[in-house]
Amino acid sequence: MRLATALLVLLAAGCATFRPGADDAATVSETVSMAVETLRSTPEVQRERLDGALNALASQPSDANRLRAGVLLATLPSPMRDAPRASSLIHVVSDRRPETPMSQFAGLFQVRMLERERELDDLRERLNAAERQAAVLRAEVESLRANERILADREEMLRRRGQVLQRGVVEREETVRRQVEALRESERSMAEREETVRKQIEALRESERIMGEREGRLGTKTR
């Protein structure tokens, strides 16, 4: 639809400056109307109209047929569009001297085609720049994701190492606790043994005292 609007604008601009030439002006008007109607048609109708224009050009290479075929080749959507071929056909008509309404229209149309190609080139360049920027951003995102994976792996490794260390600490604490309990048990056993030995010593001393007293009494009686 934008192309159809552009054609109508070209027609309006051209009609304001066209020199007398009823047949050529009618051809231009018919060409624009045909192009606008074709653009609004289905792809099948578009292909049929283009084939008809190309066949007419092949059988009769007149400026009118060049203009019709060139306009269709320039305005139809891909894959029917052929800008280089359209430009070569329109260029032949625009170079006619003296100027006619048809050559004037062809000149205007060719200028518009060149402007459109420049716009498309600029759009393609901006698109390529955007794609390059998007590729850089994708690479940066992938790098960030890779770094995140590395950090996640390191975090998991540290977590597992921490668990191992924690288990080691717990095991060591348990070992020390058992050793302390064993030492305390040994201390209790030693204390009990010391108490037993002390009691035995006291018993021996008591026995010695008793024996001493008995010996004393026996000695007194002997005298």
Image (cartoon, rainbow, N blue to C red):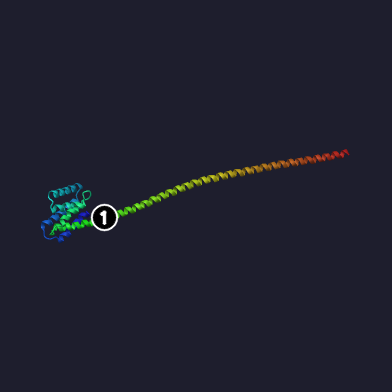
Give the percent coordinates (x, y) of residue 9: 19, 58
Count of numbered circles in the view: 1
Q: Residue at x 15, y 61 (%)?
A: 17
Depth check: give the residue in front, 5 or 214: 5
Q: In the image, residue 66 lies at what x, y percent?
A: 15, 52
Amino acid type, mark 1: Asp
Residue at the farthest right position: 223
Residue closer to the observer: 156 or 174: 156
The residue at the point 26 percent across, 55 percent down is 121
Quadrant of the rendering where the C terminus is positioned: top right
Residue 119: image location, x then y, percent: 25, 56
Q: Quadrant of residue 177?
A: top right
Sort mark 1 into few (<14), some (14-19) or many (20+) by Cα contacts within 10 Å.
few
Q: Residue at x 23, y 55 (%)?
A: 117
> Can see residue 36?
no
> Left or right: where does residue 39 sit relative to residue 165?
left
Q: Nearer the viewer, residue 82 or 163?
A: 82
In the picture, measured across the screen, residue 221 lies left or right of residue 151, that is: right
Q: In the orientation shown, which residue stands out farthest toward the bottom?
A: 17
Label 1 secondary element: helix
Q: Which residue is mark 1?
A: 121
The answer to whether 108 is drawn above or below residue 49 in the figure is: below
Percent across and percent down for residue 113 are: 21, 56
